[in-house]
Image (tube, grey):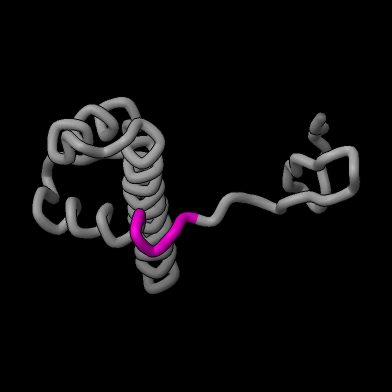
Amino acid sequence: MFCHFKLNSKWIRAAYGGSYRLGCVRTEHIKRIAKELVNRFPNRFSSNFDENKRLVSMFLPGATPKVRNQIAGYITHMYGRLATEQVSDKQSANEDKNETE
């Protein structure tokens, strides 16, 4: 039996026996495949998980559903992080522009 509780703003799945995990870390294998797919097909992926999942299953037909979802999730995470970095860069550029005027 497992229970879920929040510790330091992170949800933790704990066994009643007392052992718990802070989160699932993606393996280097998943990250390497995801980065390779993004390098080969940079304009095909986006921050939409379902679309990325469909594309990963198309490019890697032998991947298991778990591996496919992990790769698609990491690609979605990468594109989401890029989008937030671009927004923050634009905001800082606008702030710098307003300060010089």
Instruction: Report the residue at 32% width, 37% height from top.
Output: 68
Examine the image and state in which quarter residue 88 appears: bottom left
Can residue 87 be seen here?
no
Q: Position of residue 85 (x, y in %)?
A: 39, 58
Q: Answer whether residue 100 is magenta in the image.
A: no
Q: Position of residue 65 (x, y in %)?
A: 35, 31
Q: Nearer the viewer, residue 37 or 84?
A: 37
Residue 29, relative to residue 7: is it above or below? below
Q: Nearer the viewer, residue 99 or 21?
A: 21
Instruction: Report the residue at 83% width, 49% height from top.
Output: 7
Asked whether, in this view, residue 22 is left or right of residue 63, the answer is right
Q: Position of residue 18 (x, y in %)?
A: 89, 48
Quarter occupied by the C terminus? bottom left
Instruction: Report the residue at 47% width, 55% height from top.
Output: 26
Can residue 12 be seen here?
yes
Q: Which residues are magenta?
A: 26-30
Instruction: Report the residue at 32% width, 47% height from top.
Output: 75
Quarter occupied by the N terminus? top right
Examine the image and state in which quarter residue 99 appears: bottom left
Q: Residue furthest right?
A: 17
Q: Which is the main secondary structure of the residues drawn in magenta?
A: helix
Q: Residue furthest bottom?
A: 100
Q: Position of residue 4 (x, y in %)?
A: 79, 34
Residue 89, relative to residue 65: is it above or below? below
Residue 48, relative to residue 71: is it above or below? above
Report the number of numbered marks: 0
Q: Nearer the viewer, residue 91 or 11?
A: 11
